[in-house]
Amino acid sequence: MTRIFSGIKPTGHLTLGNYLGAVRRWVEVDQHRADALFCVVDLHALTVDHDPGRVRRLSRQAATLLLAAGLDPARCTVFVQSHVDEHARLSYLMECTATDGEMRRMIQYKEKAAREQQRGGSVRLSLLTYPALMAADILAYQADEVPVGDDQTQHVELARDLAVRFNQRYGHAFTVPRAVRPQVAARVMDLQDPTSKMGKSHAATAGIVYLLDEPDVIRRKVMRAVTDSGSGVAYEPDTRPGVANLLDILAACTGSSPEELAESYDSYGALKKDTAEAVVEVLRPLRERHGELCADPGQVDRVLREGAERARALARPTVDAAYSAIGLLPAL
Ligand code: TYM
């Protein structure tokens, strides 16, 4: 059976980008067709300035939201990365397989490091080695497929390269994974700055729809979205990114195509209004279920405990075999 692994990082409240680019597919497709593991990757949240209490709260909230969105623990495994030691164990072997140049070429590293340096801050070493940990996340489970949004495909490519290299050097240890991206909304853009990704750790929040935003807040954010100066509605992502982003969001929420939708609108106002309502309706059941789950924290704890047990049992033999293959003396 196909094995799927994917993760989400608790560095901020989850956004519409996370939902349309990744989580919705996990819920609607992946958990039904494969042996799927979904992980709140809290170790990755320590790669940038962080507040310990906030990371803890966001990790629990992310896990609760994944369940609220419809991940069913009877069908898939939901767990927290730091509960399974194998991620950190294997990450070191990945650092011993990757090169410094490979890590420095990662677009996310370059962008985040440049931003930090501009602010006069320093960059944590773990931000550079982040893709080694991400490769470990994937390879520890022998995952065949990794469903992610556009921004993560370069990291998955690197995980692929590392799997191939490790296997060639030390004998077959890992399945070589591949990234799977959604057909629409693979990159949801910020409503106030449609040339940059809607990201959960951005400081300016007016262009970001969070999964737990109240309906009126969602309406306000969408109605104030920056559009382009052209007239008429057309789907031209390169020249008219604001309108294209709204069309992508509406298409993803309604299951139609952005090109078709463009033909049925002649004003930005009507497009915004329908997009806002579509987003509100897509997120409504999720918000409601989140409220119910918060009232029963024991249920979330149980899911995470059982998820970590299963994940540990799957990852342990793979990581032990990799330790042995690379030349480490097995502990007796
Ligand atoms: P993260 O937490 O930034 O995002 C989680 C998932 O949401 C997708 N995504 C988006 N998709 C479309 N439009 C957007 N604006 C948008 N923003 C985020 C991401 O592509 C991702 O699929 N490094 C990863 C987490 C990770 C991981 C892994 C993923 C760690 N280990 C192993 C897969 C496999 C990250 O930071 O995702």
Image: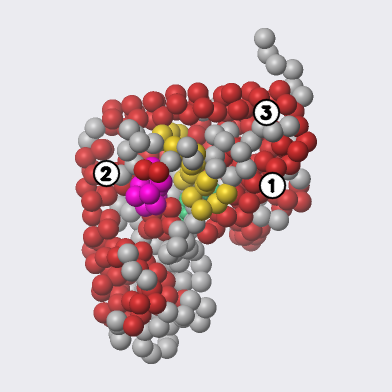
Queried on whether the Cβ of the residue with tag 1 lies below 8 angstroms from ligand 1, the answer reads no
Q: Secondary structure at mark 2?
A: helix
* Residue under pointer 1: 161
Check the image and report above or below for 121 versus 163: below
Main secondary-structure element of the magenta-colored stretch? helix
Gap in angstroms between the C-alphas marked 3 and 2:
39 Å
* Pointers 1 and 2 in contact (C-beta within 8 Å): no
* Residue under pointer 3: 322
Gap in angstroms between the C-alphas marked 1 and 3:
16 Å
Check the image and report above or below for 196 versus 157: below
Viewed as shown, does residue 52 lie left or right of 306? right
Viewed as shown, does residue 109 lie left or right of 278? right
Q: Is residue 220 magenta?
A: no
Which numbered disc covers residue 290? 2
Task: Looking at this view, name the residue that lies furthest to the bottom.
Answer: 231
Viewed as shown, does residue 35 lie left or right of 101? left
Q: Earlier in the sequence, mark 3 or mark 2?
A: 2
Q: Amino acid at mark 1?
A: Asp
Could you say which quadrant of the image residue 322 lies in? top right
Residue 139 spot, x, y in % from top left: 60, 37
Query: As rendered, which of 108 and 49 lies closer to the eye?
Result: 108
Residue 223 spot, x, y in % from top left: 30, 73
Q: Amino acid at mark 3?
A: Ala
Check the image and report above or below for 227 versus 140: below
Query: As rendered, which of 324 and 17 lies closer to the eye?
Result: 324
Which numbered disc covers residue 50? none
* Pointers 3 and 2 in contact (C-beta within 8 Å): no
* Pointers 1 and 3 in contact (C-beta within 8 Å): no
